[in-house]
Amino acid sequence: MAQLTTRQVSVLAALVTAIGGGILVGVSVSLMDGPLGMWVPFLSAVVLFGIAYGVLSMAIEQFVNSRIKVLYRTVHNLKRNRPAGEPPEPAGDAIDRVNNEVREWARERRTEIKVLEEREKFRREFIGNLAHELKTPIFNIQGYILTLLEGGLEDEKVNRDFLNRASNGVDRLMKIVEDLDMITKLESGVMDLKLKALDLRGTVEEAIQELEIQARDKGVTLRNELADDVVVMADKGRLMQVLMNLLNNAIIYGREGGTCTVSSYPLDEQVLVEVNDDGIGISEEHLPRLFERFYRVGKSRARNEGGSGLGLAIVKHIIEAHGQTISVKSREGVGTTFSFTLQKAPQRLGRIASS
């Protein structure tokens, strides 16, 4: 059954009052003769209805408003996130207004709760992943130091080797801390980018040369297929980080005898850069989370393969700090392609030295 409004309640109460009053008046004048005696009860009922409706309507409105005004103002201000004050009074029944406000407020709170639950889930995963990443090098360092303290320090066959391993563990810890610090600065906007016109082909060639030995050891060929006249606006140091990280991933997860190709395509005021490899690939279920901090893709991309687990997260933040976007597409056993955009230089400057 639908809820009655205050006006409907007033009408019903006034009608009952009018009928009752009309009956009483009719009984009292039933002994009167003539046609006037027939109209007195009817006229009395009409007059009583009008009076009762006016009085009851005013009384009920005052009664309801006086008790729900505080509730209405509180809900309205919570919903609008405003300091306490007089809320606007939209037209319509008071109870309906409160009911609609509460429903809308409840919908917003459910949405906020859902967002908070997702954030809490991400926070738990992040803390768990961070603890796991830190635990491995810390335990390794602890094991090497304990071995040295328990007599290995006097053994020339193991002391220098274990000290070097402990040093490598410290380096890995420092890498994780530095990468986390970099992501925090990129997210907060503290880290300023020094944008300038860059020869994209020359910058890619420099990154390939840095990884030439590593690629040769893995049997992966790195190819630079960019044209000579591609000039972009970017921070060279940060762009080198992006390229080095993506090329390094292609080497680590590439197959022996495979290739990784860097190419570009013009897009109006932007340049689309693609880093494509024919390695092991990534299953589709992992792609949406690939740029999350410490996110790993199964055993094939396990933690024992090194790295801080923050490389792709840093890549994403650097590209977004340039005001651009990055995406990934991949198929298992076929390969992976990372695509990101860069802003074209305001004018074609010919070949620019990448230094």
Image (cartoon, rainbow, N blue to C red):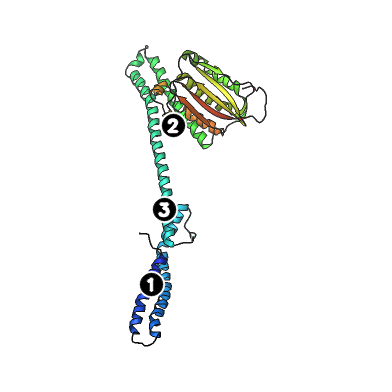
| 10 Å crowding of disc 3: few (<14), some (14-19), many (20+) | few
| Lower position in the chain sequence, tag 3 or tag 2 | 3
Amino acid type, mark 2? Arg
Residue 351 x %, y %: 66, 22
- Residue 12, position as x, y percentages in the image: 38, 69
Circle 2 SS class:
helix
* Quarter placement of the C terminus: top right
Query: Between residues 8 and 346, which one lies in front from this camera angle?
Result: 8
Give the residue furthest to the front: 35
- Disc 1: which residue: 15
- Nearer the observer: mark 1 or 3; the answer is 1
Q: Quadrant of residue 56?
A: bottom left
Disc sitting over residue 103 in the figure: 3
Q: Closer to us: mark 2 or mark 1?
A: 1
Q: Residues within 10 Å of mark 2 (few under 14, many from 20)?
A: few
Residue at 36% in and 75% down:
19
Q: Given the image, on which type of amino acid does mark 1 rest?
A: Leu
Q: CA distance from mark 3 to mark 2?
A: 34 Å
Element at label 3: helix
Residue beneath label 2, please? 289
Give the mark toward the camera: 3 or 2.
3
Q: Is residue 202 above or below residue 313?
A: above
Residue 247 is left or right of residue 344, and the answer is: left
Q: Which mark is residue 190?
A: none
